[in-house]
Structures are given as structure tokens and as C-alpha cells.
Image (cartoon, helix red, strand yellow):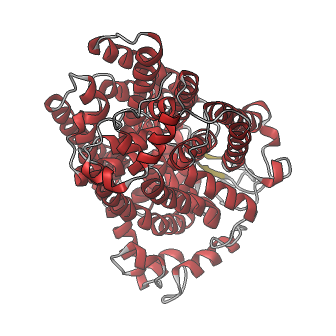
Amino acid sequence: MNALDARAWTWIFVGVSLAVHAAVVVWSRARAASAYYVAERRSSPALNGMATAADWISAASFISMAGVVASSGRDGSVYLVGWTGGYVLLAVLVAPYLRKYGKYTVPQFVGERYASKGARAVAVGCAVFVSFTYVAGQLRGVGIVLARLVGLRVERAVLLGVAVVLLQAVLVGRRAATHTQVVRYAILLIAYLVPAIFLSLLLTGVPVPQLGLGGRLSAGGAGLLGAEPGRPLLDALDGLGRELGFGRYTGGTRSRLDLLASTLALMVGTVGLPHIVIRFFTVPKIRDARASAAWALLFIAVLYTTAPALAAFVRATYLHAVEGTPYRSAPGWFTGWERTGLARFTDRNGDGIMSVSGDPARNEVSVDPDILVLAAPEIARLPPWVTGLVAAGGLAAALSTATGLLLVIAASISRDLVKGLWIPRLSERAEVGWARGAATLSAAAAGWLAVHPPGHVAEVVAIAFGLAASSFFPVLVAGIFWRRATREGAIWGMIAGTAFTTLYVHWFKFARPDLDGPAHWLLGISPQGIGTVGMLINSAVLVVVSLRTPAPPQAVQDLVTRLRQPREADRAPGDAPAAGARARW
């Protein structure tokens, strides 16, 4: 397949996508704070569920997740299980209660529930820190797509991505973001399903990817992989991996404790993600928040059940396409990604033949897992338009989540910090100005981290989830279900959990990356899973300190009781706490 043809199709799909987004932005541009933050609470449950799914299906989900599963097999399943289970946990455990509270942001809830400006300030810092780390992963994803599109090194393409993200986040707001994210969800879903269906048909003759994963090789698929027809796909993939020195694709190397900790960190971290929680504030009523959660879960499940199948298809076609190929005849997809710095051939034995091996000393081909999904159509020699469609979907996923995250940072700084703590009489116009300035500075700083990432996109995002787990999860759950939780417990719990997780990640990813391995990890738990330990530290500190400090004011305890009354939640619009519920600061 001609790589230039694929690039032309990419320009077409991306151009059409951006044009549609621009039209929606102009139509629904935010002019008031309620529109900028929560879309004036006019989103229907189905549309808000679709927009939530677009927020959720980030660059990590679209670009990186299947690539990580393809490269690591069973070990990559923690992302599938953790992120899917985490959304269920969020929808059932936290979202309806926070929506009943009826404010814009999580720090607002923390501040009023714990009757403390200090708790609100710490929550603002945690929200900004989590969102900053998360948005860095999304900007990396934007940069990867743009790098292939315009032929730049990924580092330069990230800077271009920062400008693209800011163009929407700074100029519009949550209302426009809701509508554009509905469009983006449709784009990214089609872009994800089309190559998966093509590959499933190619390898197994089954048009449903989820069924193709457990299917048997068709005659065409057997010829492509050099295996006998009728052999189970996963069995053929295990055999191909063993021949090249890899472990079983259906096996893994990570310890069970690390797998458990990483999965749990992703699950409980979901509950503390500010940009997802705020989505439940954009619907008119509390019962709509529950319906919105159900719709979002349905939309998310479509992609997440397709990911493991796509990962297996990609790994099979990639290994077959690279192994034994002369470098002078390297396929166009490889040389194209080589120019971005995300693919590399090192001729260790001087024979000019590309060789893939599970032994690092013998392996000659290095391909970043983040490019495997984007390159899948070219690897399998699918029509050029499929390549363009996948690139447009990857860009839509990264832009959608990056925009939502920047809006959370903007809301946290302008509404919770500036107006909530520093300048209470700040005008609406000035507040939106502060929000846009905060988004601009945050995007610039996150762009630096995206240029110097501590890992692939899914790994960076997993770290953000760990930070969310260690900072917000215990405080939110205790704030809803435990009347005795105090402001001192909340403050010191957030500080202890976040500090531990941050220092652990910094040590292994930045200070001493040479020690980043199971032999040096605490209890064999990786930086992606350490958020679980941070969450336990936060919980322990919160409980101990709360029991050793005076109980919260009665008004706060009454608020906690009201938050857990479903009948009242179904009757009330949820735009403000009941009379007398606002705590004294």
C-alpha cells in the first residue's frame, strides 16, 4: 500500500472531523460560567452518556491500550479490567451522590463537606496535579497522531498538539465540549470498529471481532500467519510467539500482587477523576445522572470489548509482517513511523534482515506500543482510507479527553481557588478569564511532560489514575458514607497518600529509572499500581486523624445524611444543597 495515499486519506478524515468540531464550537460557544463549566445543565442523559464515553475513551484507551495488550499479552489486561470496572464503581458508589450535591467541582464538595477552606485548597492542588498528569498523556497521544500526519518528530508534533487542544479548551467550555464530544464519540467508535472488523474477517472469517478473538484461523488467515487452517487464533499466536523467543501471549510475567494492585489503582482512581465526575453535573436532574451513567457504560463497553480482539489481531499481523523482512524492503508503515522516532531498526548481526525476538540482546526491531493501533491498517494492508479513519479516531479520542481535563484544571483554579478562596466577588467574566489563563499555563507545562514522558501513553495515564486513587477516593467515599470524617483527617489523608505516590513514581521514573524493575519495587508493585498503596495510606491517615479530632459540625453531618436519601434526590433538581446544609467555614 502506498503510504502517501494513506496520508492523503488521513488529511481528509482529520480535516472533515475538525471542520465539524469547529462548526459545533461556534454554535455552542460558552458565554457564561454555567455554560463554561457544566453546559448550563441542559445535556440529555443519552447525549451526556455519549460525551462521557468520549471523555473516558482517551488516547490511552484508543491508541495505547490495545497496543500495550498486543505487546505484553495478559499483563496488559489490567487496563481493560481496571478501567471498565472503575467506571461501574464510579457510577454506583459516588456519581449520584455528588450530583445531588449540585455544585460544579469536586473541590467544592470537599470544601463544604469537610467545612474547611484548607481541605478545599488541598483538593484543588490534587485535582490540578491529577489532571495535569493525565493531560500530558493525552497530549502525547495527539503528538503521535500529528507526527505521522505531518512527518515530524514526535517531540515537535506534541507542541503542535498543545496549540490544537488550547484552541478549543480556551475559547469554548463544557457546553461546546459536550456537543463536540458526541461527534467525537461517533468518529472514534467507527474508527476503532472498522479495522477490527476487517482484521477479524481477514484472520478468522468472522465479522464480529469479539467472536473472532476466540475463533479459528480461516484459510486466508492461516496463509498470512504460516499456520494450519482451523487452528485457534490464540493458540497460533502463542506458537508464533514461542518460535520468536517470547512467552505465551495468553501468559504473563508480572506478579499477581502487582496485577491486583495495578487493577485496583485503575478502578478506584476512576472514582477520583475530576473530569469524569464533573460530567454528572451537566444533566438537569439526579435521576438523569444515573441514566447518563448507564448510557455511558453501554457506549464504553462497545470499545472495551473490542480492544482485546484488536490487540491479538495486531500482534499476529505485526510479527508476521516484520520477521525476516530485508530492511531495504521495509514496508512503508515502518519507514514512516521511523521518521517520527517511534520505530527503529538496529542491525545487530549485519545481515540487513529485520528480526523480532523476545530476547533483548537479539531483538533488532523496536516499535513503540502506542503506534500499533494506528499502524494496524497499513501492517495488514487494508485499504488506505481505513488508515486515515483510524488516525482521525485517535486524534478525536486524545483531543476529547485533553479538552475535558483542561476544563477541570480551569474550573479548579478559577472557581475553587481564585473565586472560592481569594476573590469571592470576582465577576463572571473575570472568572472565565482566569479559567482560560489557567488552562493555557497548564497545557504548556503538560506539553513539556508529554515531550519527556515517563512511559507510553497508557502508562502515563495509569500513573494519573494512581494519583487520583491516593488523593480523592478515600476522601470522597468517607465524605459520603461516614459522618465522623473530619477536615483534619481529609487534609492529612490527601497529603499523605498523594505525597507517597508522587515520590514513589518520581524515584523510579525520573530520579532512578535504572532501578525501575520488580527487584527494586516495594513488594514487587510497579509505579502503575502503587496508587493502591497510596490509597490505603490515605484511608488509614483519614480514619486515625478523624477519630482523634473533634467531630464535624452538626450541619455537616446532616448534609451527609441528606446526600444518601434517594427519594429526596429523585424529587429535587439538585442544583443546591438543602437549606441549612451549607457548612460554616
From the viewer's perspective, is residue 444 above or below residue 90?
Answer: above
- Furthest-left residue in view? 27
Of residues 292 and 501, which is closer to you in this image?
292
Q: Quadrant of residue 300?
A: bottom left
**Rendered residue at 38%/51% (across/down):** 96
From the viewer's perspective, is residue 340 above or below residue 266?
Answer: above
**Rendered residue at 39%/64% (across/down):** 301
Quick check: can you spot residue 384? Answer: no
Q: Is residue 180 left or right of residue 141?
A: left
**Rendered residue at 41%/79% (across/down):** 211
Q: Is residue 244 left or right of residue 200?
A: right
Of residues 35 and 257, which is closer to you in this image?
35
- Furthest-right residue in view? 519
Of residues 233 and 455, which is closer to you in this image?
455
Q: Quadrant of residue 279?
A: top left
From the viewer's perspective, is residue 14 above or below residue 127?
Answer: below
- Number of dots carrying numbers: 0
Q: Position of residue 102 (x, y in %)?
A: 34, 38
Q: Is residue 70 left or right of residue 569?
A: right
Of residues 146 and 96, which is closer to you in this image?
96
Q: Position of residue 156 (x, y in %)?
A: 48, 26
